[in-house]
Amino acid sequence: MDISRAGDGGSPRGLTVLETRNLSRRVGPRLLVQEINIQVSAGEILAVVGPSGAGKSSFLRLLNRLDEPTAGTVLLKSTDYHSIVPRELRRRVGMVMQTAFLFPGTVAANISFGPRQRREAMASARITALLERVGLSGFADRDVGHLSGGEAQRVAVARTLANDPEVLLLDEPTSALDESSVRGVEELVQGVVRERRVACVIVTHNREQAARLADRTMVLKAGRMVRIGATGEVLHDA
Ligand SMILES: Nc1ncnc2c1ncn2[C@@H]1O[C@H](COP(=O)(O)OP(=O)(O)OP(=O)(O)O)[C@@H](O)[C@H]1O
């Protein structure tokens, strides 16, 4: 890695929420993710870009232990995530995938899924407020089977927010949406990251999306970080 161009893996905006230390994953002889060191701070959006097969999704899946690192680790507010029980880790590190993975049933049942699993009641006023925040007022009793792709992604975001996460991971969250829904979901993501001061990491193959959303951008190639810095500079030079 060219250190001068790889630039500042640290976060310029204050409180570090998420930090990776030599984060790596090997599967057999293949190094999918190699010694990644980054920090993401509260209220910051970091985009992860790079060619197909570069390891972007593999990297993201390490951040909430959907996959296990084979070397290195992740710190969540300075605590090694291996010492946090997985259910608590998944509550604190929320993830939204390319297509919303919703359970059959109502929108409200999906949104209250996390709290229910922890045997916490979720007041209907809170569900109403979350739905309002994601632009789905009045959707509580709708069957998720009848939602559009954009509406389903909004429910997925609301379900994650119901857990009060400190980190939001997004894996190509708009790539399955039609053009008319993309901007709305982007604005929603940007709004909640700023309001709630969560640290956000978004994998995207779309440079324009990185430019619209991300404070900093990291470029991955063959599992390695080859560049990180302010989005404008990184995309300009790439
Ligand atoms: N469990 C696995 N075992 C072996 N190889 C894997 C595994 N998961 C992913 N890979 C390989 O690792 C590489 C990185 O995959 P990954 O999906 O992380 O890339 P990506 O940058 O997200 O790609 P894309 O933009 O196409 O989604 C690919 O070559 C993929 O085939």
Image (spheres, grey):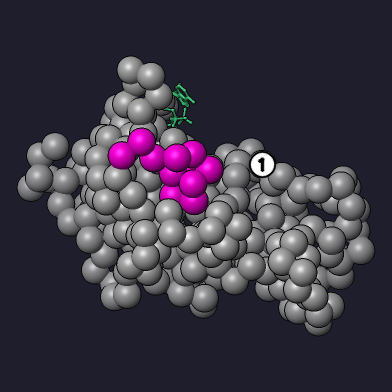
Q: Is residue 163 left or right of residue 8?
A: right
The quarter in which the C terminus is drawn is top left
Report the magenta residues as a range: 60-71
The kind of residue on which mark 1 rests is: Thr
In this rendering, would 95 be left or right of 84?
right
Camera-side residue of 205 and 165: 165
In this view, 146 is above or below 57? below
Q: Quadrant of ligand 1?
A: top left
**Which of the 4 image quadrants contains residue 131?**
bottom right
Q: Residue at x 48, y 61 (%)?
A: 84
Decide: is 63 above or below 139.
Answer: above
The secondary structure making up most of the magenta span is loop
- Residue 234 location (% of width, % of height): 24, 48
Which residue position holds label 1?
99
- 32 lies above or below 91: above
- Camera-nearest residue between 108 and 52: 108
Residue 216 seen by the camera: no
What is the quadrant of residue 165 in the picture? bottom right
Residue 146 in the image: state x and y as whole percent.
88, 47
User: Residue 1: x percent and y percent?
Assistant: 14, 37
Q: Within 8 Å: ligand 1 and the Cβ of disc 1? A: no
